Amino acid sequence: MPKSIDLLKLEQLLESAPDFPAEAGKYFEPVADSSGRPSFQLKSGITVTGAGTSADSRYWQYQFKDIPGGIAGWLIRQEVKNRLRKYDRKIAVNPNATRIVAEGDSWFQHPLICDLLDWVERDPDLAVHSLASGGAELRQMVDPADYAVAVKAVKPSVFLLSAGGNDFLGDIRPFLIPWKPKPGNRDTLFHAQDYISPAFPKLIQQLRGWLDEIIGTVLATRSVQRVILHSYDYVIPNTPDDDRAGAWLGAPMRELGLTVDYLQTDIVERMVDAWCEQMMAVSQDPRWKGKVRFVDFRGSLTRTSQWFDEIHPKSKPFEKLAQQLIAAIKAP
């Protein structure tokens, strides 16, 4: 692997890579970001040089500073392009493959992990046209509704959606109540419901409305016969000595005085459960005539060693979850 690479060459290399996470992992690594968004940096010893003609030389800045979204935005866009190329090639080779449009967040698109869609795409009979983008929130998927354009163009029989988690786990602080000491109650147990803000159930209702909108739009087309939603598993907040990448949950909780491990865990489990209950209710709504299915991953990955960071499983555990998703796609 070269220590120095031209940015345009790197872009072309990633766009055509058979295994994008493996190729991207040669050059990039995750970095903690207090904003709650996916963030990456060049590995130590790797430099990226400029490229192009004088007319576009301002674009190819050595430190990615002029590229929208910086390194993370650039890297995410390369994988989006890579996947669209794979879709076109698969349809050309196997025109009878099941056509799928996927919209979603980093559980469907993480540049450095073999995520759910990376495993789904490996099935030769499944062709995934993916719009998924790491860090995306459900509110951003609804408008400008790129998924609706894709569904009309691709005419898929299956629509996959991974969404909602970034709306409250991406930055959990607005939905928490800071800890306040209670004089005389030193031994009182902590209860998660006491530290979840009233803003959270309001958000969940808003998320359900957006979910209904997406499903209604997708099923209004003639091609889509199945919409598949999935839960997240119970994410695990980090501890001060945790070496997992990323710090979305544990650190901001500690900043708010919520330092008890079991309290942190209970809070995020309640939040995940609340969103899952809404997705499950949506999947059972008689309006959709049984065309919406919910895949429940909760309780599958219980060890921190199975997690890449606080909110993303590692590649092999993702494969375990993806098999459930594939089974739902192929079920009669």
Image: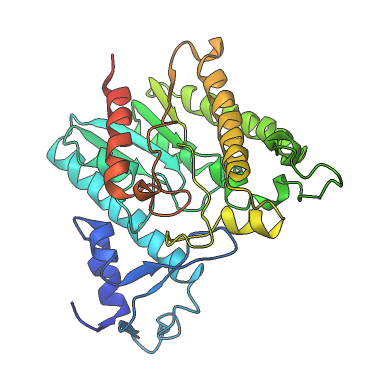
Task: Establish if 77 lies above or below 114.
Answer: below
Q: Is residue 20 above or below residue 176?
A: below
Which residue does the image show at 56% across and 39% down from the upper left? Answer: 164
Report x, y in % for residue 188.
75, 38
Q: As drawn, is 296 to the left or to the right of 328?
A: right
Between 127 and 36, the one lying in front of the other is 36
Q: Is residue 206 left or right of residue 128?
A: right
Q: Nearer the viewer, residue 146 or 122?
A: 122
Q: At 28% across and 58% down in the image, what residue appears? A: 21
Q: Image point 21% across, 60% down: which residue? A: 17
Q: Which residue occupies the extreme right position in the image?
A: 183
| Residue placed most toward the observer, 81 or 229 | 229
Spot occupied by residue 175 in the image (x, y as percentages of width and height): 71, 45
Is residue 125 placed above or below 36 in the rendered structure?
Answer: above
Quadrant position of the C terminus in the picture? top left
Q: Is residue 198 above or below residue 30?
A: above
Q: How many numbered dots are placed on residues in this image?
A: 0
- Horizontal and vertical percent position of residue 168: 62, 45
Task: Report the side of 45 relative to 94 (left or right).
Answer: right
Evaluate whether residue 52 shows in this view: no
The quadrant of the image that shows the N terminus is bottom left
